[in-house]
Amino acid sequence: MNLRIPGPTPVPAEVAQAGAAEMVDHRGPEFAAIMERVTTGVKEVFQTKNDLAILTASGSGAMEAAVVNHISPGEEVIVVTVGEFGKRFLDLTNVYGARPIEVAFEAGEPADPNRIEEVVKANPQVQTVLVTHNETSTGITNPLKDIAKAVKGAGRFLIVDAISSLSSIPVEADAWDLDVVLSGSQKGWMVAPGLAFVSMSERSKEVQSKTTTPRFYLDLKRAVDSAARGQTPWTPAVSLFFQMDKAIELLKAEGMENVYARHHRHGERVRSGLQSLGLTLFAREGYRSDTVTAVLVPDGVDVANLRKVARSEFGLVLAGGQGPLASKLFRFGHLGYCTDEAVEDGLAAVAKTLEKLKS
């Protein structure tokens, strides 16, 4: 199968094989050495010298960790939404008793830094802003660097969901002054689901010390303190650390600038290829993601049937839409371990599927 969804993404054979290595003592020197290599490698991709916690959790676990460690019940926060994953931050802040002020943008449109700045300045009592960098539900990449300037210029604390962008699209945690940055192994990192990464600025420590929300498994201070001893506070997904160790080796061998260029090349090819089939792309031009392309389903075509035919007859696995867009679009993922051949085969399969549906 040609797995072209925005996550979990394909795992290279050598990475999958690395995960089959003999188990080691997660409190022993072998694991400590692997954890040190993985943490160092992940920080290099984050472009940060800040503390970094590695959690055994999905990307949503990283999002929850960001909330419970930095936001207290009753606290007002600003949540920027451009799709379903921004709304997940909205849900999380509500669940933990915060009082979110949603700054919503139309699906398919990017977040406007100027509007965010206006809302931030109009709410001086709000100290924390949460934003999604790459919204896979709509195929949009927000202008994070400009958003960060607007938020940090006003002296606020910024939490960034970069789960589906980091390691595929440039993110400069330190240079852009991002306080908390999140990512997950099942996206551009080319690893199976189950590891989440959280980088934290110096200011994060102060915020955590004042946050009153209870936390235990997702306590980031525990994670950082344990990492200093080459351990995790709870039993880690050891086999996934084996995979990450190999995946980082592959990313370094390719070179991150080349990784970003590859993702852009694949994004451009998918966009042009789908448009050449007469399809309409959903996201606004100029902000279309290099990790996933969202496509409007042609009139008269049922998206579930399109995906079924693509999979059963042509070996192509596409993602559907989410939330209100479930019946309106499909998504073609091109992040992580993705080759030119996989892209071309995927585009050919979409063409054959459309032909089949016409007959």
Image: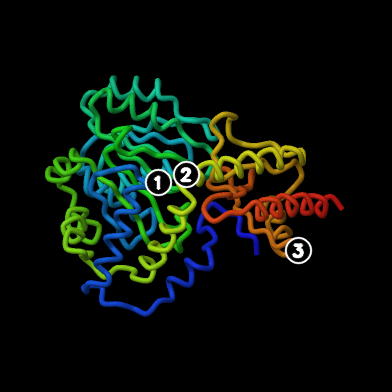
Give the distance between the C-alpha atoms of the residues marked 2 and 1, in whole angstroms.
6 Å
Name the element at disc 3. Answer: helix
Which quadrant would residue 230 be assigned to in this image? bottom left
Q: Residue 287, relative to residue 44: is it above or below?
A: above
In the rendered image, residue 150, in percent from the top left (x then y), is placed at: 33, 24
Depth order, front residue of 22/277: 22
Task: Provide the residue designation for mark 2.
Answer: 84
Name the element at disc 1. Answer: helix
Q: Amino acid type of disc 3?
A: Glu
Task: Provide the residue designation for mark 3.
Answer: 313
In the rendered image, residue 301, in percent from the top left (x then y), is placed at: 74, 47
In the rendered image, residue 10, in percent from the top left (x then y), is placed at: 54, 61
Which quadrant would residue 318 be assigned to in this image? bottom right
Q: Amino acid type of disc 2?
A: Glu
**Crowd rating for badge 1 (residues with CA inside 10 Å; few <14, some 14–19, many 20+):** some
Task: Provide the residue designation for mark 1.
Answer: 88
Name the element at disc 2. Answer: helix
Identify the residue at image location x=74%, y=59%: 309
Marking on residue 311? none
Identify the residue at image location x=36%, y=38%: 172
